[in-house]
Amino acid sequence: MKEKRLLVVLTIGLAIVLATASISAANQANVDPSNFVKEVNNKLFPLKPGTTFFYEGMKDGIPARNETYVTHQTKKILGVKCTEVHEQAFENGILVEDTLDWFAQDVDGNVWYFGEDSKELDPSGNVISTEGSWEAGVDGAQPGIIMEAHPQVGDRYHQEFARGVAEDMARVLSLEESLCVTYGCFDHLLQTRETSRLDPGVVEQKYYAEGIGFILALKVKGGDERSELVRITTE
């Protein structure tokens, strides 16, 4: 009987290891620039140049807001032309983080994350840290998947893959959530759970709406943080 239970445990453990390995292998696959398209138009993560998303909320009791602007700039990484997104984070009205992110979409509709240039600022605007910055192809970093073409409940994937620098992972929890934020009320939302090996005590849940993208983030473990979509502008 003990031997049977041991066999079950070993089988489950092997399945977990193989699943994790397959995720890693998928993100470390060779990138073929011919497999990518010019626009990022995934219905759950559209990036139309000239669009600005405004988010507001609280971070550990401090008023916080984010402005995410889809620029008209591109950056070629591993031969792939990536859309550049400029994100600024404010706390108590003061700019505390200034980041450039790079994304590209493959022919199947998956949106890949190719890196970020992140700068943490002091109240005077001086750069005090670039922690979390990475670029695919540099120091062994690999692109991750920020949004699947066809998410399914239970899917797990690396969003970032820079060992010891950025190792965010996501798991799909639901495709049928409903909720309201300042910008509006939505049904059939994608809900994900995000974690990182580098911050094992932190868990965040995010919600995405078709045709818009990211609308709400809630830190459910490791802090008190909420950020929701309040406005969208286009040029």
Image (spheres, rainbow, N blue to C red):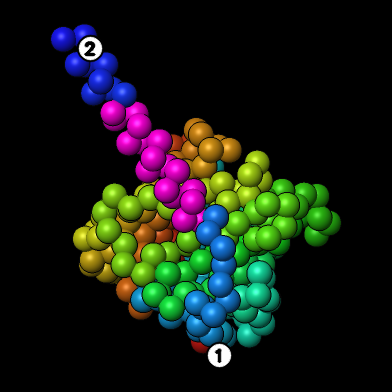
- What residue sits 39% from the left and 65% below the top? 148
Q: Position of residue 174 (x, y in %)?
A: 26, 55
The quadrant holding residue 10 is top left
- What residue sits 49% from the left and 38% below the top? 202
- Check contact, mark 2 vs mark 1: CB within 8 A: no
User: Is 6 located above or below residue 218 in the figure?
Assistant: above
Furthest toward the left, the residue is 1
Left or right placement of residue 118 versus residue 211 in this view? right
> Magenta segment, which residues?
11-27
Amino acid type, label 1: Glu
Amino acid type, label 2: Glu
Quadrant (top left/top right/bottom left/bottom right) for the C terminus: bottom right
- Sequence order check, earlier mark of 2 and 1: 2
Q: Is residue 64 magenta?
A: no
In this rendering, the count of numbered labels is: 2
User: Is 2 located above or below residue 85 in the figure?
Assistant: above
